[in-house]
Amino acid sequence: MKGVDELQRLLKKSKRPRALTGAGVSAESGIPTFRGPGGLWRNFRPQDLATPEAFARDPKLVWEWYSFRREIIAQAKPNAGHTFLALLENEKPDFWLITQNVDGLHQDAGSRRVLELHGNIWRLRCTACPKYVEDLRVPLATLPPKCGACGAVMRPAVVWFGEALPEGTFAKSWELAQTADLFLVIGTSGAVEPAASLAREAKKNGAVVVEINPEASALTGVADLSIKGESGEILSRV
Ligand code: BJW
Ligand code: ZN
């Protein structure tokens, strides 16, 4: 396939490759994406679940949604797309993976240079005190879970709409976008900012942008090469 050959060529000569991944990279592991057919938001409005206001209004409802997703993720395994990106890290000492995903499957596949823009579903933080914990239990003992230190409600340590991304993580991602020579955009609709702007920033600074997605996205116009297909399937051929 022409796109795959071209990507192979670009990877071979790249010294500073980066990848931005989204929910689509975990779709072949059986984890639903957010938008589109079968997406997690087909039956819900994002503002009813993924905002601090929604959580303040009904923490149990929001936690039930996260609990449901934790159950699915707990049973999922990394796919060929995750594995490819983990192996790329060994080949390219300056490769960095920037993910919007909260599922931790990149780390499960062996990736270590991972920046999580939107947090991680396995971590919880207290709404009242600095307590921050990893909790892998499925299901959790109570919904909403309570802080062991102060008794207040815990929340998932993820980034909701209207919340700032972890400052150091985003700053580092921005710098990596600016210094990229190759920027892979894999399995994201590019609908959410500021994550999507990383691809634009990379392009502005001279990187070749390659998209892998079975559908057109908000970032297809930014891509120099757009490979249509499922990321696990495509990357297993690179
Ligand atoms: C496959 C596939 C296969 C399928 N292989 N591909 C500028 C303009 C307008 C609005 C804004 C703006 N800047 C900021 C905003 C507001 C807002 C925003 O972006 N709104 C837009 C909706 C317009 N952004 C924010 O609020 C962000 N915060 C912020 O900007 O703060 C500013 C601030 C500064 C200082 C102080 C205070 C505030 C935060 C955004 C947080 C996003 N959070 C979520 C939830 C995380 C927790 C959780 O998981 O529950 O993150 S929303 C959700 O969307 C999740 C995802 O990471 C994110 C992106 O989705 P993704 O990954 O792209 O998934 P999908 O489903 O959209 O797409 C899947 C793709 O895969 C599709 O294209 C498929 O085709 C493809 N696919 N199978 C490859 N096998
Ligand atoms: Zn607390």
Image: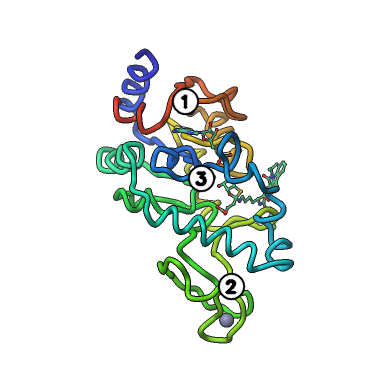
Residue 11, quarter of the rendered image: top left
Which of the two marks, 1 or 2, is nearer to us in this view?
2
Is 102 rendered above or below residue 94?
below
From what the image shows, is residue 55 above or below residue 175? below
Residue occupying image coordinates x 53% and y 58%: 168
Task: Indicate which disc residue 155 carries.
Answer: none
The CA distance from mark 1 to mark 2 is 45 Å
Tell me the quadrant of the picture where the N terminus can be found: top left
Residue that badge 3 annotates: 175
Residue that carries the numbered disc 1 in the rendered image: 208
Looking at numbered disc 3 in the image, what kind of residue is underneath it? Glu
Horizontal and vertical percent for residue 154?
A: 57, 73
Q: Tell me if residue 158 comes above or below residue 194 in the rendering.
A: below
Mark 2 = which residue?
Answer: 144
Q: Is mark 1 on a helix, strand or loop?
A: strand
Residue at x-position 45% and y-position 35% = 180
